[in-house]
Image (spheres, rainbow, N blue to C red):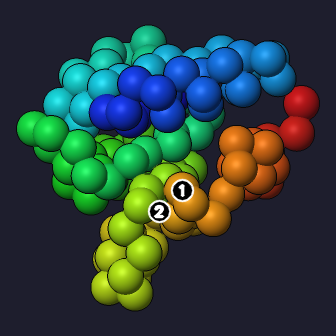
Amino acid sequence: MIVEDDSFVMDIYQTKLSLEGFEVVGANDGKEALKKLEDPQCNPDLILLDILMPYVDGMEVLKKIKEQDRLKSIPVILLTNLSQKEEVAQGLGLGASDYLIKSHFTPSGVLEKIKMYLPKK
């Protein structure tokens, strides 16, 4: 699952992951992501989550994911432009598996990080 309010960034990652054979579910903001995750049929292997989004921000989405037994074991990678130590510490403290700063990673680099957290098939 990719949760990203920037449609350009969303398209890049959806395309990259789809070309690698991943099935991608997208959400344009935190509210939409939480709605999709309420469905028991929605069981993503990993969530790529932006922080700065309208309605419900990524930190709140992460908190809600980690509070739910069905979802809390899903690896969540925060992919954001926020690079302050406080945000990194908060995200990892809330249970994020990793914290990636968008400007420091190419889509290929993000893909390599994603593969680190997925079970080998």
36, 101: nearer the viewer = 101
Q: Percent from the top left, x then y, of residue 34? A: 25, 31
Say whether residue 88 is left or right of residue 14. left
Q: From this viewpoint, which residue is outermost toward the bottom?
A: 85
First of labels 2, 1 by sequence position: 2
**How far, Cα to Cα, is label 2 from label 1?**
16 Å
Residue 96 - label: 2
Residue at left 47%, top 62%? Answer: 96
Asked if 35 appears above or below 59 in the picture, the reply is above
Residue at left 89%, top 30%? Answer: 121
* SS at badge 2: loop
40, 91: nearer the viewer = 91
Q: Percent from the top left, x then y, of residue 108? A: 79, 44
115, 65: nearer the viewer = 115
Amino acid bearing label 2:
Ala
Residue at left 26%, top 52%? Answer: 52
Asked if 76 appears above or below 1 in the picture, the reply is below
| Nearest-to-viewer mark from 2 and 1 | 1
79, 102: nearer the viewer = 102
**Residue 6 visible in this rendered orientation of the protein:** yes
Residue at left 43%, top 57%? Answer: 80
Q: Residues within 10 Å of mark 2 (few under 14, many from 20)?
A: many
Asked if 24 appears above or below 57 in the picture, the reply is above
Residue 102 - label: 1
Q: Percent from the top left, x then y, of residue 84? A: 37, 82
Say whether residue 36 is left or right of residue 89. left
Looking at the image, do the residues carrying marks 2 and 1 touch, with CB atoms under 8 Å apart?
A: no
Q: Percent from the top left, x then y, of residue 57? A: 20, 49
Amino acid bearing label 1:
Lys
Asked if 107 appears above or below 116 in the picture, the reply is above
